[in-house]
Structure formats: C-alpha cells, structure tokens
C-alpha cells in the first residue's frame, strides 16, 4: 500500500493523541520495562500505519491500536532475548559516581552553613588529613579548641546530611 504525504501528518496527530495510552498498556504488559515498552509502542504505530487499510471503524481506533500493541507484545515474548544489559540502565560505576557527586554537592552546601572557624577545622582535619595537633598549629589555636570545633561541626553537619535535615 502506498501512503500519500498527507497521511503522515494525520498519523502523527494520532500518535500524539494515543501514544501515551499505548505506552501505558505496554508498560503494564512488560512489567515496567520502559525500553521494551517504548520499542513496542513504535512497532505498534508502524504496524498501524502500514495496516491502516485494515481499520474498519467497527471498533474505536484506540481499541484497534491496543489490540495491535497486545499482539506485538505477545510476538516479542516469542522472540529470543539477547543476553545483554540494556543501554538504558547505568552501569554500577556510573550510579556510584552520580551518588558521589550528589553527596559532595550536599557536603559543600552543608559546610557553607557552618561558622568559618568550624568549617576550616573540618576541612583541615577531615579534608586534608592533618592531625588535630597539626591543624591546631596551622590555625594558631590550642588542640582542645580545634577538637571542639571539629566535634561541634560534625554535630551540626549530621542533621544537614541525613533525612532529618531534609524534612526541616
């Protein structure tokens, strides 16, 4: 069947109107596998476009599309699945790196809420790895004062970096 150029825009409107419905049905059928559901949605609309002469109008267009989608899903279950990791899932290293970046941004933000003397003490001891004595000497304060600053800073940071602080 040949399609005229006028068919494509009108079919595009149908995709706009029914695409989410078809995707929703396929998401349920694929147990939430978004990549598979999106692929099957594309296959459904391609099959509908190619087979639009078969649409008799006896059933609503949406029902006709959902029927095509269900058949596409059923056919996909018969096909052997390749033994690969879907590209839509980030490898664990990317997920961990993303989490590390998020944690670092949260830490920098929380540190910015501390008084300068506590911020400096934490950065020298925990960030730079100086001993309490080395950090105290660098800042020109007694070791006890520096230990108190670090302890107090950690006490203030804890709620800022946990779920408790997010609800405040």
Image (cartoon, grey):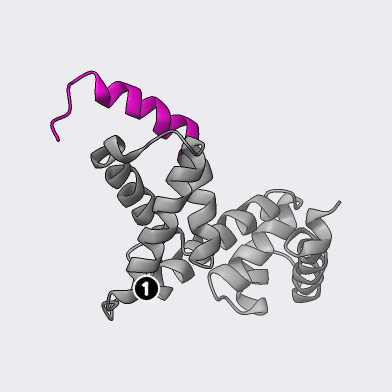
User: Residue 90: in sight, yes or no?
Assistant: no
Task: Tell me the magenta residue range.
Answer: 1-18
Quarter of the image holding residue 49?
Answer: top left
Main secondary-structure element of the magenta-colored stretch: helix
Q: Can you tell which quarter of the image residue 144 is in?
A: bottom right
Tell me which residue sits at (39%, 60%) in the image: 71
Q: Residue at x 40, y 63 (%)?
A: 73
Q: Nearer the viewer, residue 148 or 110?
A: 110
User: Horizontal placement of 165 versus 40: left or right?
Assistant: right
Horizontally, residue 125 falls left or right of residue 41, namely: right
The reply, left or right, for residue 125 in relation to residue 31 is right
Identify the image quadrant of residue 161: bottom right
- Nearer the observer, 124 or 87: 87
Name the residue tied to disc 1: 77
8 drawn magenta: yes
- The outermost residue toward the right is 168
């Amino acid at each position: 069947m040949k399609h005229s150029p006028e068919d494509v825009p009108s079919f595009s409107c149908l995709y706009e109107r029914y695409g989410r419905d078809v995707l929703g049905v396929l998401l349920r059928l694929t147990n939430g596998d978004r990549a598979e559901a999106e692929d099957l949605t594309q296959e459904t609309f391609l099959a509908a476009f190619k087979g639009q002469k078969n649409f008799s109008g006896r059933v609503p267009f949406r029902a006709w599309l959902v029927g095509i989608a269900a058949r596409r899903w059923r056919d996909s279950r018969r096909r052997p699945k390749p033994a690969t990791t879907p590209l839509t899932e980030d490898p664990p290293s990317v997920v961990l790196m993303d989490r590390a970046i998020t944690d670092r941004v949260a830490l920098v933000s929380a540190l910015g809420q501390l008084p300068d003397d506590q911020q400096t003490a934490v950065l020298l001891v925990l960030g730079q790895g100086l001993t309490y004595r080395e950090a105290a000497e660098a800042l020109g304060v007694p070791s006890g004062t520096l230990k108190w600053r670090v302890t107090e800073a950690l006490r203030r940071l804890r709620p800022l970096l946990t779920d408790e602080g997010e609800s405040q």
